[in-house]
Image: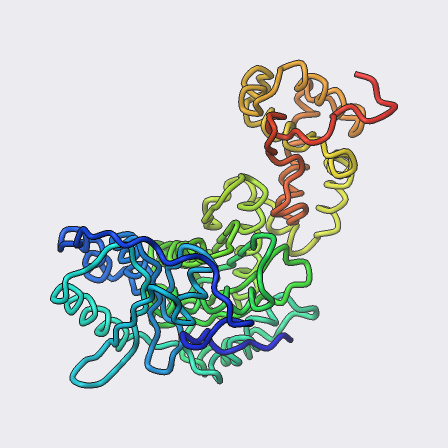
Amino acid sequence: MQSTSPPERAGGPAAGGELEGEPPAADSRPVGAEEIAAVLDALEQGSGLPEAARALGRALQASVLISDASGATLALAARSSGEERALRAGGSGVRTCPLTIAGERVGTLVLRARCRVEAELMRVITLLLAAEVRQLRLPSEGRREGAAALLGQLFADPPPDLELAGQQARELGLEIASGAGLVMIRAHAQSAVGEDWRERCLGACERALGASCERWLCAFSERSQAPAAELLALVGASGEEELQRLSHALFDELRSAPATARVVVGSSRLFHSAQELARAAAEALLSANVAEGEQEGDLVLAFEQTGAYRLLLPAMRENVQELERFYAETIAPLLAYDRQYETALVRTLAVFLEADGNVAAAAQRLFTHRHTVYYRLERIKELSSLDVSSSEGREKLSLGLKAMRVLGIGAGAAPGPQRSGGRGAGGGRSEQPRGVRR
């Protein structure tokens, strides 16, 4: 089981001691109370320290880092990875403000801003942030290890003892009987990230939960098939609305982190018994898989929002081989063809079915000519032996797509993504491989 590292520390230079990016040009215009209103709103509405940091960054056109007294990062709103390194190392143009209440230093505000703030207004801001920092507590190292031991085994084979898992949760301060939900979080990184990327994702999730929830545990899922940095959060919640609020808080914090390319969050239904943990894990996994495969871009999806996909949950949990077999008979040949020739048969099929079989509408959505769509549909028929012009063919191919998404096949790497250069969505190399005639 993978161990977890402590939260990032605010002090100290980055590896190699180099900073990226020049300090931002100063803006002589002072910032007034109206422009800080979003920061005050975030604190007043209980949105948490991470959202307050993002609001402050927008108001000051700044990169912002807030840490506690020990130097552990509580909130980060950096414009880039270089800006983050500058904040942590005290680069040119970086301002450090102690966060103090009643003579006790509870943390530090570090910012690199384009705008200047009057001294009295900055005093108000730091006092409000200090009050928020004082009530925010990150988990201890022992609690972090306990969360990893509990959540890291939910997808293990053989499955964990659920009664023991419930007992472990109680020992860590989370009583499942009071209401809980399981959230799966996936963060896809940009091409160049440091070796500490996974731990940084964990730190971001802990910050979001620490600012938004009283009872929570968070750790890596430890699934070998995970397509990205994949984490699980077991959160105490009184209802579905609160569970969704926490899911969006996790999404917002990770999405704003530097070097994050894409974020997907899937959540289970609310449950009140440790015996439901296995079902909740399957629901969170299904929701995350559907979110990645159903749409491009970022998405937060609850199990109740997965529609007809919910009907496949029993097969996913109890007879996954049959689901895999159905996928192999329908969509697998198309996906293999797409990967070999960099074409877009699977995406074309999905868009065509979403357009209710309307070729012109599908072509418009794909930014391509309708003749190209006809050609791709003909290739689909040849490869799968299923004709999209028949109701039976469309039904089987639609179920095949659902099976693919529920299984998480190709998650995060949909075939034939949009490319630059005017080739259109799904364009890659020529769709007519050598030896294949249109």
Residue drawn 32% across the image and 57% down it: 62
Tell which residue pokes out farthest to the right in this image.
435
Residue nearest the observer in this picture, 107 or 20: 20
> How many numbered marks does the figure carry?
0
The chosen color scheme is: rainbow
Residue nearest the observer in this picture, 131 or 323: 131
Residue drawn 14% across the image and 62% down it: 118
| Quarter residue 281 falls in | bottom right
Q: Is residue 238 visible?
A: no
Residue drawn 60% across the image and 67% down it: 195
How far across and down, in percent of the image, does residue 305 sit? 46, 44
Query: On screen, 406 above or below 270?
Result: above
How far across and down, in percent of the image, does residue 94 sit? 33, 66
> Which image quadrant: the C terminus?
top right
| Quarter residue 194 falls in | bottom right
> Which image quadrant: the N terminus?
bottom right
Residue drawn 75% across the image and 20% down it: 378
How far across and down, in percent of the image, does residue 381 sit? 76, 23
Q: Is residue 410 visible?
A: yes
Tell me if 350 is positioned left or right of 324 in this view: left
How far across and down, in percent of the image, does residue 92 sit? 37, 65
